[in-house]
Image (cartoon, rainbow, N blue to C red):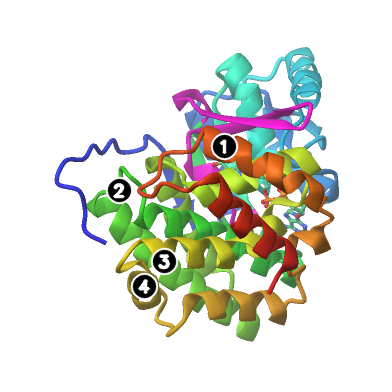
Amino acid sequence: MDAPQRFNYAAAPQRVLHGAGRAAELGTELAQLGARRAVLLCSPGQLGVATEMSARLGERCAGVLPLARVHVPAELAREAGEQARRLEADALVALGGGSAIGLAKALALQTALPIAALPTTYAGSEATPIYGITSGGDKQTGRDPRVLPRVVIYDPELGRQLPLGLSVASAINGMAHGVEALYAVDRHPVTQALAQRGLRLFREGLDALLSSGERGPMLTAAWLCGHVLGQSQMGLHHQICHALGGRFDLAHAQLHAVVLPHALAFHAKRLPGLAQEVAEAMDVPDPVAWLIGARRSAALPASLRDLGVDSRQLAQIAAALAKRPYASPIVATEASILDLLLEAWEGC
Ligand code: NAD
């Protein structure tokens, strides 16, 4: 799709380190941030790796909080904030996926502490100034420069234990950022180029991961697609995932993997040139078929029904989405959104 002739670009003030073994440089990076009492945040499953990392940091780590949960419940953010204050934290280290990084962002919003992120999934949150917090099933997202991690370390050795299904689902989550950036109302030459490159790297990276366990290209793809997410207005695909994820407390990556084939087909029908652009970027003849194939090969849930979504609530959700749409190049009616949701509920 053509780039608009008027656009804005602001480079993200973030240091990025990429490469095997580079997590060992975390202490030096924290010292450069002036941090003496960093608090390490992770999901409960990453406590072992986080404890090892904390031991390597020595006195520079004031404690480990293995509290992260998907969609960042507001009460959890409050509790973690109190614990971080008690530990007199002067920096936040987020180790893990978007949940650990999301919790660090919620704390940075309260405290303005700097974040160092070590991502182990491909969700891309580390590259954005976007935060999300959920209260009573309602997930609210916002943007604030204080939540953009100051340092990101992409170390392929860190995420070796990530299960294959989650790797594929998380890659599709990252690809969703690239796809939506291609038709974002505020797209520009930088986001277009990075989104195209990120989509290709995800497609090639998944092959490399499956054949040799190599994670480096996937992390690079996550960075590029995360960066464009931070630079672009999200569209209907992300709006659907935020609404369903918050309301039904769904696994984020698996939800993206269910919705993206339907959302991409929906937009491709309405935006001439999109299907070809995504196909060329990924170097596959049919990106929707590729996404479905990748999802099947990892035996991931194929429908909103499989994820446990109550279909009786879809009409109400479609009405709410149509009433307050995210910025989009298309006008999606309530009826068309409901059709999309029902298709995703049936699955493919
Ligand atoms: P996640 O962080 O919840 O991780 C999913 C699961 O993978 C968890 O059980 C976790 O313990 C496990 N895991 C993570 N790393 C692992 C590893 N190395 N080995 C084994 N298991 C590992 O999931 P996610 O999909 O990365 O992130 C989802 C969250 O991130 C959602 O809340 C979503 O809204 C948010 N997100 C935010 C942005 C943003 O820009 N703000 C972007 C993308 C996602």
What is the span of residues highlighted in magenta in the rendered image?
120-147
Q: Rate crowding at label 4 as few (under 14), some (14 to 19) or many (20 or more) other CA atoms within 10 Å.
A: many
Decide: is 303 above or below 31: below
Which type of secondary structure does the marked residue at label 1 adopt? strand
334 part of magenta stretch:
no
Asked whether disc 2 touches disc 1, contact meaning CB atoms under 8 Å apart, the reply is: no
Distance from disc 4 to disc 2, alpha carbons, whole Å, reads: 16 Å
- Decide which of tag 4 and tag 3 comes sooner along the chain: 3
Question: What residue is shown with label 3?
Answer: 268
Q: CA distance from mark 2 to mark 3?
A: 17 Å
Depth check, front residue: 86 or 123: 123
Which numbered disc covers residue 281? 4
Give the number of the mark in front: 2 or 1. 2
Callout 4: SS: helix
Residue located farthest toward the left when viewing the structure as drawn: 5
Quickly name the residue at label 1: 116
From the viewer's perspective, is 214 left or right of 83? left
Residue at mark 2: 187
Instruction: Please tell me whether mark 1 or mark 4 is closer to you in this view.
Output: 4
Tell whether 210 sits left or right of 180: right
Count of numbered tags: 4
Question: Which of the two discs, 4 and 3, sits closer to the camera?
Answer: 3
- Disc 4 marks a residue whose amino acid type is Ala
Would you say the residues marked 1 and 4 are in contact, meaning their CB atoms lie under 8 Å apart? no
* 330 to the left or right of 38: left
- Quadrant, the C terminus: bottom right
Asked whether the beta carbons under mark 1 and mark 3 sit within 8 Å of each other, the answer is no
